Image (spheres, rainbow, N blue to C red):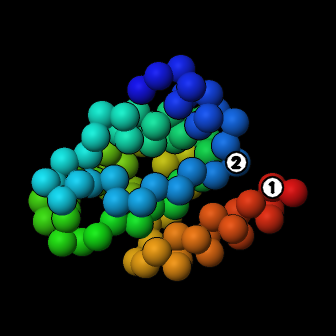
């Protein structure tokens, strides 16, 4: 992840993540770093993941399990949604709150 990616995450009011786990079942290093940076910065994150691409639950290794010990308070700002439409609606709703 380059400085430009970090800067974009830092400036974001919300982060939308579309299928962070690839069809090969892996989360890219850059995607993981951006999610972690958004968590540490308190930036709300909306994530849509095709379930068939994440059979081994790789995404949970990045974002953790809700209620698990050791997670930052901002971990609660992660919203896993069930459809692309919910991802779009969530991001738009969050953006309206920012105005």
- Number of other residues with Cα within 10 Å of mark 1, as a class: few under 14, some 14 to 19, many 20 or more: few
- Helix, strand or loop under label 1: helix
Disc 1, disc 2: CB below 8 Å?
A: yes
Direction from residue 8 to residue 37 in the image, left or right: left
Q: Please name the residue shown 41% across and 66% down the image.
A: 48
Q: Which residue is mark 2?
A: 13
Direction from residue 42 to residue 70 in the image, left or right: left
**Residue 77 occupies quadrant:** bottom right
Instruction: Pinpoint residue 73: horizontal percent, then vertical percent.
Output: 54, 45
**Residue 38 occupies quadrant:** top right
Q: Is residue 72 above or below residue 78?
A: above
Q: Which residue is mark 1?
A: 98
Q: Please name the residue shown 80% across and 65% down the image.
A: 96
Front position in the image: 60 or 20: 20
Q: Using the rendered image of the protein, determine whether residue 69 is visible from the camera's viewpoint.
A: no
Direction from residue 42 to residue 71 in the image, left or right: left
What is the CA distance from the residue labelled 1 to the residue labelled 2?
7 Å
- Number of other residues with Cα within 10 Å of mark 2, as a class: few under 14, some 14 to 19, many 20 or more: some
Assign the N terminus to one quadrant of the image: top left
Instruction: Pinpoint residue 31: horizontal percent, then vertical percent.
Output: 38, 41
Direction from residue 24 to residue 30 in the image, left or right: right
- Helix, strand or loop under label 2: loop
């Amino acid at each position: 992840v380059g400085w430009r990616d970090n800067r974009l995450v830092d400036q974001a009011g919300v982060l939308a993540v579309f299928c962070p786990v690839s069809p090969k079942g892996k989360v890219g290093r850059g995607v993981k770093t951006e999610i972690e940076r958004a968590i540490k910065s308190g930036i709300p994150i909306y994530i849509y993941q095709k379930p068939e691409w994440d059979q081994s639950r790789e995404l949970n290794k990045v974002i953790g399990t809700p209620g698990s010990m050791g997670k930052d308070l901002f971990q609660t700002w992660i919203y896993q949604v069930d459809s692309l439409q919910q991802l779009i609606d969530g991001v738009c709703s969050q953006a309206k709150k920012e105005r």
